[in-house]
Image (tube, grey):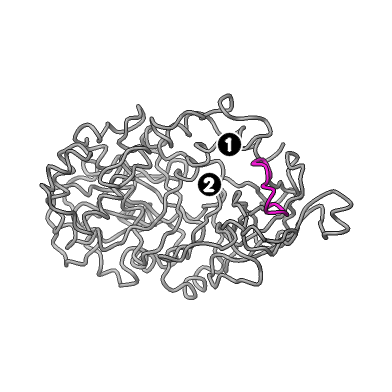
Amino acid sequence: MNTSASWMKIVSALPICAALGAAGCAAAGPDDGWTEDGAPPEPIAEALERMMPRNSLHAAVLSAGALLENEALIFHLASSPLNDASLNRFLAGRPMRASEKELLEYVVSCALDPGRSVHGSKGEFGLCGASGLAHGNWFERAPSRDCQEAVTACVLARVNSLGKRVRISARSTQDPRDRELFRLAPVVPVEKEYREPGAGGARSFSDCPEDTRGWSSARECGWSGRSVGACRLGERVTLRPSPATSVPLMVRVCKGIHGCDSASSPTGRWYAGHVAEGILSSDPFIKTFYGAKAELSFDCPSSGTTGPWSFAVMVAPPLPSRPLPETADVVLGTFGGYRRYPASEAEVFTVREGAFYGSLFANAISGGSATAMLSRAQYACYSDVWTRPMAHMADRMCAGRDEACFENLPGPCLDTGVVPADGLCQGQLDGSYHGCAPPPDEDDAPAETTRSKHVVTVYLNHPCDLASDVNECQKAYAPFSPTRL
């Protein structure tokens, strides 16, 4: 079966419609815009891109001081519809502050459907959108408690103290609506932009000048991203043109989930870089005169820990003036072991980081410093994969400061065997934590009355994705090997 056909077998109308929201189900299923040898239509590809959020919200926006400064906005959002007319009444003609604007951006992206926008901020996940799966329609009416909890978990899951833009896998399974709205994607599109602010992406994604000569896989223009694959360290991976690819195909393989340039243009980034490239064709003439091969083989790229880890596939036409058909892609030429292409979100994002929950909109008074994170009714817990869990959480949310940066100190998501039990959550369902409560010393109420119904569990592609000191992180997790779902 070719790659596009395998997409078709595992993508159903329901998750795509949930990701697109009410505005975008025009080509949502195999009988509407799909063919056996065809690539998914553009709305589907865009939905797959949106199904995996980026972790890029500046931590300072959620500090205790920033929340106090923006308390009036938070109160307004908690008691009003989320639309331009309502926000204009609140602003009364004044411009939004930068911290208000960034907070609004992430609230809107989590809450509203694609196609909706509020003051330039665009909806993405529709947790409180118009869909029947959503927690009420925040665009038209004040948010319910369920809506506020779901959006809070989504926003907290996307905090990055280093200001980087890191793709994560967000999962939530306790509530059936959350399960559908945080549906795992069947394939992972290649990332086209690097993580650092303003870094852009590989030059190879740019269009080629008219005078560009062809038949060089080292060319740094005219490439397209396809999908991410998965493998284990030490495995040999072989790729071949898919049955639907009837033309010569230039293929480049990159480390991780990001695109890259040729071997002569190293990225200087630990998480991305060139692995292999070549021209693939079965035509004897092209093999003889252009050095084409029937397949491209490479060793599973190392990421500093044992894996499983990822590789990103890019394709390009040998002649820039002759674009590839959308169906052009590769398939695995070797099977067995852990090799996957394309790999699903669950196969690419295997490091369970922890969970985020609570309410950004709760009427609670902060007792910590202005820079404190997880203040008021915001909480987090960490999974059992971490050997230094508090160091990781402080890195992720406090730019490397120690645990004193938290007002509500994160704890283990599940019991660690300490008596009395110290786990903050009731358990796991399909790899997602549920029924999580505030730390016991932060709230004297019985846990059952304070447990969150809507919890977002975050998975990472690599344990050092959110680390400020990658060298130290890789030393700590060199033997780390997560268990795939």
Q: Which mark is residue 40?
A: 1
* The N terminus, quarter of image: top right
Please report contact status of discs 1 and 2: CB closer than 8 Å, yes or no: no
Return the residue nearer the eye: 181 or 378: 181
Residue 97 at x, y percent in the picture = 19, 58
Q: Which mark is residue 161?
A: none
Instruction: Between residue 90 and residue 172, name the one nearer to us.
Output: 90
Q: Secondary structure at mark 2?
A: helix
Q: Residue at x 49, y 71 (%)?
A: 476
Query: In the drawing, does residue 59 fall left or right of residue 289?
Result: left
User: Can residue 283 be seen?
Assistant: yes
Q: Quadrant of residue 117?
A: top left
* CA distance for labels 1 and 2: 17 Å
Magenta residues (range): 317-328
Measuring 13% from the left and 48% from the top, which residue is drawn there?
Answer: 91
Of residue 67 and residue 367, the one placed in the foreground of this image is 67
Q: Is residue 137 above or below residue 91?
A: above
- Label located before the other in sequence (1 or 2): 1
Q: Main secondary structure of the magenta part?
A: loop
Amino acid carrying label 2: it is Glu
Helix, strand or loop at disc 1?
loop
Q: Which mark is residue 345?
A: 2
Q: Nearer the viewer, mark 1 or mark 2?
A: 1
Give the x, y percent position of residue 311. Answer: 62, 57
Location of residue 254 by image quarter: bottom right
Q: Nearer the viewer, residue 59 or 309?
A: 59
